[in-house]
Image (tube, rainbow, N blue to C red):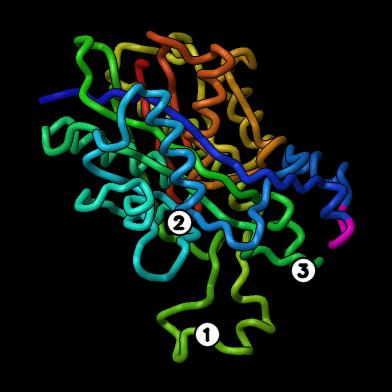
Amino acid sequence: MYKARIIGTGFYVPPKVVTNADLAKLIDTTDEWIQARTGVKQRHYVEPGMCSAEMSEYAARAACQDAGIDVSDIDFIYHATLSPDHLMPGTGVMLGHRLGLGGVPAMDVRNQCTGFVYSLASAQAMIETGMYKTILVNGCEIHSTGLEFADRGRDVTVIFGDGAGSAILTRETRGEGYGILKTVLHADGKFYKALWCEAESSCEHPRLTHEMLDDGRIFVKMKGKLVFAHACQRQPEVMREALEGSGYSLEDVDAFVFHQANLRIIQYICGQLEVPESKVHNNIDKYGNTTAATIPIVMHEARQKGLIKEGSLVLISSFGAGFTWAASLVRF
């Protein structure tokens, strides 16, 4: 049995910056209202013509450079997203093509905000069993082309941004106590309508109608208070679960990597668990919620600023639509 190790990270966000003031020109909102409820100050949007596979390629190549490997060393690709470039095929195969990895298997993961951690767990298992050696785990979202820029969609529209983040995993060689130590995954479909996009749907005949468009059923709908309450409950639970049996406590963790859905959720969890601000890097103010891309983007920036370094014990956690929630304990 091998252990899996994260050896490199990278990310890409498109250059176009959209501020809260910019959104206030399109919908009934203000910078003060958005910051108070979400913590978002700005976000990045793609320009017409840019696709997820392109952004993911940039993030993946940056992660390979950071890891000190050649792209050709990758022997499996996980691509986590809720916004694939096309309904079919999956975007992972297009990413592999852009990277010149013909013949290398690719799998799309549709777990929304927990997609990256679910992919991390799957890559971890593949490396531990010896099935694959060097795996690219990528998360990417283009939200901006699927948001409702009208007062009806205001609560959702102000939250999300576009971006891609990647990590390179390979076999741990430093001995016991390093690498990905434990990953915990959960889901409960009871609340799937609390955060969902109803249409288009293969349950409908036809899948898409003018009525669906007029009713706004093609846009994400969220029951914000319910999502907030469950995120504040489930993330602390799964974080504690990831530490169970590890020999470590919350106090031993050097850095916490939270999914960037809402700054108030992160602040609530940190208060509940008595996590010091010095151990947390947040970037929701700059990028908004980039869903499957948030964890690798935060992780890379935390490494850049020295919060995560060689030997750091890191606790990663996420909560999202489904509902799904997950955590991973990692020794870098």
Q: Nearer the viewer, residue 84 or 294?
A: 84
Q: Amino acid at mark 3?
A: Arg
Q: Is residue 4 left or right of residue 296?
A: left
Please tell me whether residue 93 is drawn above or below residue 168 in the rendered image: below
Q: Nearer the viewer, residue 307 or 101?
A: 101
Q: CA distance from mark 3 to mark 1?
A: 20 Å
Residues in magenta? 25-29
Going from the N terminus, do you reach mark 3 or mark 1 first? 3
> Who's the residue at 87% across and 48% down the image?
21
Residue 164 is left or right of residue 108, and the answer is: right
Quadrant in the picture for residue 252? top left
Q: Is residue 267 above or below residue 324?
A: above
Mark 1 or 2: in front is 1
Return the x and y of residue 312 as percentages of the image width and height.
Answer: 42, 11
From the image, state whether disc 3 or disc 2 is nearer to you: 3
Q: Which residue is mark 2?
A: 322
**Secondary structure state at the residue bearing disc 1:** loop
Rendered location of residue 169, percent (x, y): 30, 30
Q: Amino acid at mark 2?
A: Gly
User: How many numbered tags mark residues here?
Assistant: 3
Instruction: Say which mark, if any, is on residue 49.
Output: none
Is the Cβ of the residue at disc 3 closer than 8 Å to that at disc 2?
no
Disc 2 element: loop
> According to the image, label 1 marks what residue?
208
Gap between marks 3 and 2, in whole Å? 23 Å
Residue 290 drawn above or below residue 169: below
Q: Which mark is residue 152?
A: 3
Question: Which residue corresponds to the image point at 51% horizontal and 77% vertical from the top-left?
Answer: 200
Which circle, 3 or 1, is nearer the viewer? 1
Element at badge 3? helix
